[in-house]
Image (tube, rainbow, N blue to C red):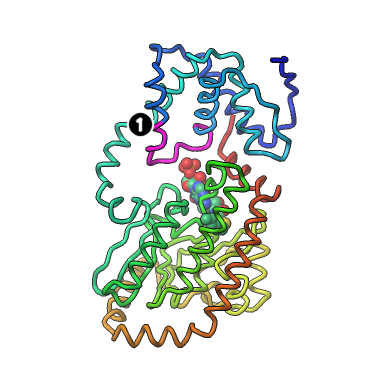
Amino acid sequence: MAAMTWRPARCWCPSLLQVFRFQVAQVHLGRPTMRASQQDFENAMNQVKLLKKDPGNQVKLKLYALYKQATDGPCNMPKPGVFDLVNKAKWEAWNALGSLPKETARQNYVDLVSSLSPSSEASSQGKHEADEKVQGSKDIVVTSEDGITKIVLNRPTKKNAITFQMYQDIILALKNASTDSSAITAFTGTGDYYCSGNDLTNFTSASGGKEEAASRGAVVLREFVNSFIDFPKPLVAVVNGPAVGISVTLLGLFDAVYASDKATFHTPFSHLGQSPEACSSYTFPKIMGSAKATEMLLFGKKLTAREAWAQGLVTEVFPESTFENEVWTRLKAYAKLPPNSMRISKELIRKNEKEKLHAINAEECTTLQARWLSEECINALMNFMSRKAKL
Ligand SMILES: CCCCCC/C=C/C(=O)SCCNC(=O)CCNC(=O)[C@H](O)C(C)(C)COP(=O)(O)OP(=O)(O)OC[C@H]1O[C@@H](n2cnc3c(N)ncnc32)[C@H](O)[C@@H]1OP(=O)(O)O
């Protein structure tokens, strides 16, 4: 293979790549404790698929590089284009391993996978086994009592950012809640955040090319938002803390929004090279007027709970100290009202716009699918992922 001339190209995110090269160099120097068999290697590959906790992008790039080195040997692919940021990061990772022998790469891969805390994974798997059987993942917890089905975003270490699995779990939870014995369905978050929106690694960690990931994302998003448009029972958001992105835009499809006074409401779509979703391109101007909607959806103005209340996005703001007690006491009382009457009244309020909302949702998803492939968006996602990588 012709020696690859390596020019110190202007890195799109030098800190991430430098950190990554440094880490890969460490792996390169790693001395295999024993020679991993092919079976060990295959077992390690299967173990990666079972990891419950996302190991982060640096580790995933390292795993990718060691896998390629162990199976294909030294990097033999042409360097991707400057704007193909994700594949360029993967190419850099592999190329950084140089002439590391296949056997050593295989052993390092096995060692790295086994270091991703399999014991704690096992205990957490045991601990959440029951939950996952019910909801599909431990990150969405659904309970039903006092006439209220509560759907809880339960990923506090990641500010309740929504993964692809969580989108699916919420769709299922709403489907089940629409026919269960509860009168009201409520959403809330665990920890200090309500929700920090879409998990920004959803696309960078997705298998297949970025076009496939964007297409799949648009399909999931459209189904996800439709499940809110079509939900037949009173739907209440209990906003326990800061809300970002899709967790804010969805509020236009809720029937009531109760917020702690520590909650904030932020839709940084332009910053992310993205565009509005969850019908907010229609509901926000309708709720707060086009100028206030522009400040949020285009300029990314973050609102306090009181500002969101003044603009009609929030129904009522409660002091943090009494928020949980006041809101759940009120919802338990509302849940005792005749459920069919509430459902029929909601249908009267919403039926005239359902078709329009479905069409708006479809258009927003098509627009977003293109935005996710834009350089603006890819750069923004990479910047987010490298913002903590410091040398
Ligand atoms: C099917 C696809 C549907 C797509 C629909 C379109 C939806 C669009 C949106 O929702 S756009 C909005 C996306 N969200 C964001 O841009 C927020 C990004 N996060 C942040 O800005 C900050 O994390 C913060 C302001 C929310 C909190 O900051 P801070 O208090 O400093 O905490 P950390 O940043 O350290 O966060 C702790 C931990 O959580 C991880 N994390 C937080 N938010 C996200 C996220 N949205 N995606 C992925 N990961 C997130 C963060 O990386 C930290 O992880 P670490 O401890 O570093 O492993």
Residue visible at 68% across and 75% down?
291
- To which quarter of the image does residue 121 belong? top left
Residue visible at 58% across and 75% down?
283
Asked whether residue 54 is drawn in magenta, I would say: yes
Quadrant position of the N terminus in the picture: top right
Residue 81 seen in the current view: yes
- Give coordinates of residue 52: x percent, y percent: 37, 41
The secondary structure type at the circle numbered 1 is loop
Of residues 23 and 374, the one drawn nearer to the viewer in this rendering: 374
- Give coordinates of residue 357: x percent, y percent: 56, 75
222 to 55, vertically: above or below: below
Report the side of 134 relative to 194 (left or right).
Answer: left
Report the side of 50 relative to 303 (left or right).
Answer: left
- Give coordinates of residue 187: x percent, y percent: 39, 66
- Give coordinates of residue 29: x percent, y percent: 51, 13
Residue visible at 39% across and 16% down?
37
249 to 105, vertically: above or below: below
Q: Check disc 1: other Cα within 10 Å, few if <14, some if 14-19, many if 20+.
A: few
Q: How many marks?
A: 1
Q: Give the residues in magenta.
A: 46-59
The kind of residue on which mark 1 rests is: Ser
Asked whether residue 25 is drawn in magenta, I would say: no
Of residues 306 and 1, the one drawn nearer to the viewer in this rendering: 1
Quadrant position of the C terminus in the picture: top right
Residue 264 seen in the current view: no
Identify residue for label 1.
117
Residue visible at 36% across and 63% down?
173
Of residues 4 and 38, the one drawn nearer to the viewer in this rendering: 38
**Mark 1 close to ligand 1, CB under 8 Å:** no
